[in-house]
Amino acid sequence: MRTIDLHTHSNASDGTLSPSRLIRQAFDAGLCAVALTDHDTADGLLEAEAAVRDILSQGENVDFQFIPGIELSVSYENYELHLVGLHLDIHSDGFSQTLKKLQDNRDKRNEKMIACMQAAGMDITMEALRADQGGGVLTRANFASYMLHKGYIKTIQEGFDKYLDRDKPFFIPREYLSPQEAIHLIHQAKGLAVLAHPLVYGMDISTLEKAVFHLAGLGLDGLEAYYSMNRGHDTVHMKTLAKKYRLVLSGGSDFHGDNKPYIKIGRGRGNLYVPAQILEQQKAYLSEKTASGL
């Protein structure tokens, strides 16, 4: 079965593998396509594209595709939702400028988090954090990883449970895009706007459906029905929801390397299989959308 992974993270944000190593791992895992979807940044995409070109140069019969992507955080009512953008043209007008603003807002939030941690007696500076975590976008997962390396916590999850989740001592809210702004940004880059991991937000089914209905009205294109944390009939239910609102399907592992060691690229927790036909359906949808002038 030809499989793909349309949700992964490199060390351009809060993953641990470089974009080129991530691409190589995806290829070695037998995937026929992978998307890089780092948080609020496109910085790893050029390196990833170069790694794919190197793989394709190995022979004419190499079956492997790369999909440029991103993951954007948005505020919806009292929830932080994530939208994955796929098939992006990162050179489109305004795309880089908006991402720079998002990264500046995140940097300001991170400085406040560091001040809170210092006040609590932790040994941390921005310079030390970057030296430990690399030069990419710093997320709360990077803070948890740093605390793990310094011995303040025993697991990444403990870092979130004790310090970094909402209402915990080091949580600092940051400015978010609205769903409409994020969808517009993705469409501006000629991409596909997908609601990521719809079942992880703690919504009951009626609230989730209300959110999907609202986002679809703003131009949402797809739903990430295949996901590492799905259980039982979750995937079937999400496929039904996508069909109801005429959304294309997507799916991915949410791979982060060692920051989520239980998640394997293309396989999730061992039970994830995103069929390659999903990618072809997305391309057909985008072609039809372009032809209709939308």
Image: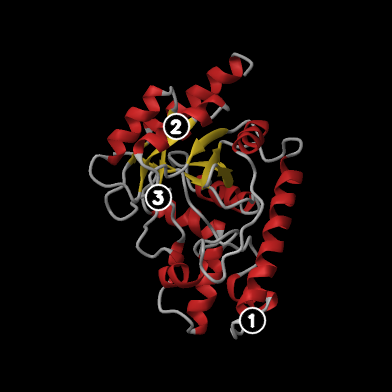
Which one is closest to the eye, mark 3 or mark 2?
A: 2
Of residues 255 and 62, the one nearer the viewer is: 255
Q: Disc 1 vs disc 3: Cβ atoms closer than 8 Å?
A: no
Tell me the element at label 1: helix
Q: Which residue is mark 2?
A: 210
Tell me the element at label 2: helix
Q: Amino acid at mark 1?
A: Ala
- Position of 227 with respect to 127 (left or right) is left
Q: Amino acid at mark 3?
A: Ser
Upstream in the sequence, badge 3 or badge 2?
A: 2
The x and y percentages for residue 273 are 31, 43
- Position of 150 with respect to 180 (left or right) is left
The x and y percentages for residue 245 are 43, 23
Q: Which residue is mark 1?
A: 119
Which one is closest to the eye, mark 1 or mark 3?
A: 1
Q: Which residue is mark 3?
A: 253
Q: Amino acid at mark 2?
A: Lys
Q: Disc 2 vs disc 1: Cβ atoms closer than 8 Å?
A: no
Upstream in the sequence, badge 1 or badge 3?
A: 1
- Find the distance from the CA under tag 2 to the CA under tag 1: 41 Å
Above or below 260: residue 270: above
Q: Considering the image in quadrants, where does the N terminus appear?
A: top left
Tell me the element at label 3: loop
In terms of image quadrants, where is residue 120?
A: bottom right
The x and y percentages for residue 261 are 38, 65
Which residue occupies the extreme top position in the image?
292
- Find the distance from the CA under tag 3 to the CA under tag 2: 25 Å
